[in-house]
Amino acid sequence: MALALLPPQEVETAFYNIRASENNKVKQELRQLFLYFENQWLTNTPVEMWNVHGCEQRTNNTCEVDAQSERQTSIYSPPFYSSPTGYKMRVRLYLNGYGNARRTHMSLFFVLMQSEYDVILKFPFNYKVTFCLYDQTPAQRHIIDSFRPDIKSNSFQRPRSEMNIASGIPKFCPLSVIQQEDNVYVRDDTMFIKIRVNFDDMPKTLLPYALCLNPGLPLHVRQEMVEKEAKRRKKAG
């Protein structure tokens, strides 16, 4: 009744304001829904792509620190989950190597982290972990290496503190490969490292194919492509 008594122009303005307010509310709800599903996507894949920035500066700084104090510095990836209620993990990178590999190789290690879901998960952690250093050219000569957890090691038991002791591949890649000028693994001072936890027991022969697929494709599309490739190879064999 109150609106009916307003001049037509004010009624139109009031209606427009109400509609604009509702549109903003809908947009906000859609944005929140998008962020929710985006987060579910990120936590529901056992594959994590890590872009490491400032490689040249980090390498130089690490060399200076090493020369002065013999301390071995490292970089941690952001934490990620194997699924929304799965294992929490991260990667530890020594750009100038660790232990016996120091100053000769780049070292990559896998770290199990404590999470709120550990009580319902299976331990010791016993899934093969694969690291892939991306060749950033169409040649796709990625450097790929894997390891299986030592289930007797404390590194793969249920975490009792924030992080377990890192375990992995000390001699992942020779420093001569990533430190040479115009190498294909460090471009614009950035390298890309993919981490894949092999929950599906993918055959070793299929790993290079799977890791060379376009990372921009949705996970389910890449999984379908791997399955088709596996069937093709089986028929051909």
Image (spheres, grey):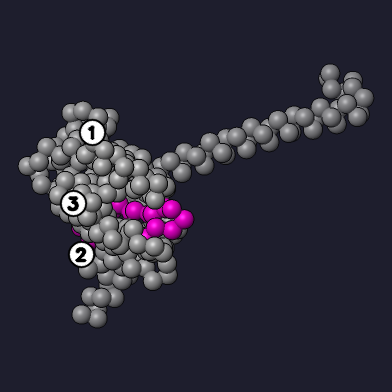
Give the structural element (helix, strand or loop) at label 3: helix
Task: Give the Cα separation between the discs numbered 3 and 2.
Answer: 25 Å
| Residue 226 in the image, given as x and y percentages of width and height | 32, 66
Q: Residue at x 27, y 49 (%)?
A: 96
Task: Report whether 158 appears left or right of 188.
Answer: left
Frontmost residue, 145 versus 63: 63
Residue type at mark 2: give it: Lys
Q: Is residue 121 magenta?
A: no
Task: Report whether 84 appears left or right of 124.
Answer: right
Which residue ends up furthest to the left in the rendered image? 152
* Residue 192 can be seen in this image: yes
Give the structural element (helix, strand or loop) at label 1: loop
Magenta residues span 185-202
Task: Give the Cα separation between the discs numbered 1 and 3.
Answer: 23 Å
Q: Residue at x 38, y 54 (%)?
A: 192
Frontmost residue, 7 versus 229: 229
Q: From this view, report whether residue 81 is shown above or below residue 221.
A: above
| Residue 91 in the image, given as x and y percentages of width and height | 28, 44
Q: Which mark is residue 163?
A: 1
Give the structural element (helix, strand or loop) at label 2: helix
The quadrant in which residue 144 appears is bottom left
